[in-house]
Amino acid sequence: MYDHLKGFRDFYPAEMGARREVIDSLEAAARRYGFREVGTPALERTQMYVDKSGEEIVEELYAFEDKGGREVALTPELTPTVARMVVAKQQELSKPIKWVSTRPFWRYEQVQQGRFREFYQTNVDIFGSSEPEADAEILAFAADALTDLGLTGEEFEFRVSHRDILGGLFESFDADVDTAAAIRAVDKSEKISHNEYHDLLVEAGLSYDQAAEFDDLLAVGEDDLDELVDFAGTDRVEAAVTNLQNVLEAAADFGAREYCTLSLETARGLDYYTGVVFECFDSTGEVSRSVFGGGRYDDLIESFGGQPTPAVGVAPGLAPLSLLLQRADVWPEEAFTTDYYVLQIGDTRSEAARIVRDLRERGHVVETDVADRSFGSQLNYADSINAETVVVAGEQDLANDEVTIKEMESGDQTQVPVDEFPGDLERPTYDDFA
RNA sequence: UCCGGGUUGGGGUAGUGGUUAUCCUUCAGCCUUGUGGAGGCUGAGACGCGGGUUCGAUUCUCGCACCCGGACCCA
């Protein structure tokens, strides 16, 4: 017996069926918006992640030297890869570029609830538009994806913020602020105490009075964003506030506004975000962590050597999403369904196979005996796979040129002439012959 | 990397420093070449791995692996 590796999981058919339904639903929502699927490698050069995130990131990677002496890593995220792809074909791709991809990623990190070392994410990105409609389309896609899965506005919320509002406010203080550190402090603010939060802001360069003032500013209501403009008095903050308002207005037209809450305390830890950022939370708070997040990252493509190309995206992870779906009791049922089981008894393979093939041609899920088992065992198996209808192709039935059609749920059955099954019927069941 | 709690047949469990490790369920076969969700019989299947203490360890102890939480981190 071998153990699996920590943070790597096996999915058996029942659970995999539920996962498949969720993934298909997410991707179907993306396809309706015209996001096109891309396929991407599992390995990239380690240097790409170091350039984007710094040398420390190597500790979090499955990184190694390949047999050709290249330093490579299992992809921990998709963004650098799609950025690389955009840069490589920048001229020939028509804008905006709208891509979707569901895939595993790997990070060497500590396992905890909703976090594994191998995990699946659906990445959805738009490249080439800085318009608020692009941000709003990402929000609308995310909202559709969640409501398609059976969630309602009672169960989740998008906490929407804007990096440039935060950065612009820090800039407007008469202090030498380490903006990145200050934004990280904001990102942590909900998890730590008030005093610890202020301490972090002071470490980033504010005075205690300024920290308190900043804290008050962030609590501003959705209708009072202009107060921030008045306070800062800079074009940067004014532009950022206008942009955020425009995104929310577009989101209203796109049907996503009702899921959005202004939450300037939401910052996302990541350095490369530049504009609107948002995180999806469980409204009941039972799932304590952010379920997923997204936002605008306008500088990344340029930093990868491309033409300046604005970008905005979101990446729901299946593991945290499943926590939310299970909490809301809309995780798909983990059970098989089978349309038909064709039961053979005696040497009836030839006729049974004909029936099986006819039914499969109609697109149904059909099983038959491949283990030479007894009548009782076959029926038992048909029950275990939740077969809806059992077609008994037994010697005795065929001797009369008949088959027996049995409805498993009720146990009712009837005889049908073998050449009338399935006949012209698309999906014949017991009721058609009773 | 750190903190806490775990690990006994496939799943859920009882128990013990000493004969054949308990029960439920599951699975397979048979009763039943003709009827599953009922019953009977038979069978399969476990002390996570390694070291130490001991005459003897599933039990005590140490290390490791894996699991469940949490901290840090979160691309």
Image (cartoon, coloured by chain):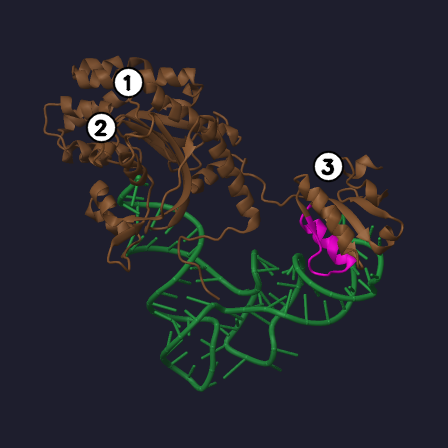
Residue found at the far front of this picture: A92
- Pointer 2 or 3: first along the chain: 2
Res. A427 mark: 3
The residue at which mark 1 appears reads as A243
Q: Colour of chain B?
A: green
Q: Amino acid at mark 3?
A: Arg
The label shown at residue A40 is none
Q: Which residues are magenta?
A: A367-386
What amino acid type should be assigned to the residue bearing mark 2? Pro
Q: Position of residue A264 (x, y in %)?
A: 29, 25
Q: Secondary structure at mark 1?
A: helix
Mark 1 or mark 3: which comes first in sequence? 1
Query: Which quadrant of the view contains residue A227?
Result: top left
- What distance separates the C-alpha of mark 2 from that of mark 3? 56 Å
Residue A198 visible (yes or no): no
- Chain bearing mark 3: A
Q: Compared with residue A115, is residue A122 higher up or lower down, i.e. above or below?
A: above
In the rendered image, which residue does mark 2 sit on?
Answer: A308
Q: Which residue does the image show at 89% across and 50% down from the upper left?
A: A400
Whole-percent x, y for residue A136 in the image = 37, 22
Q: Residues within 10 Å of mark 3 (few under 14, many from 20)?
A: some
- Seen in the image, is A151 located left or right of residue A396? left
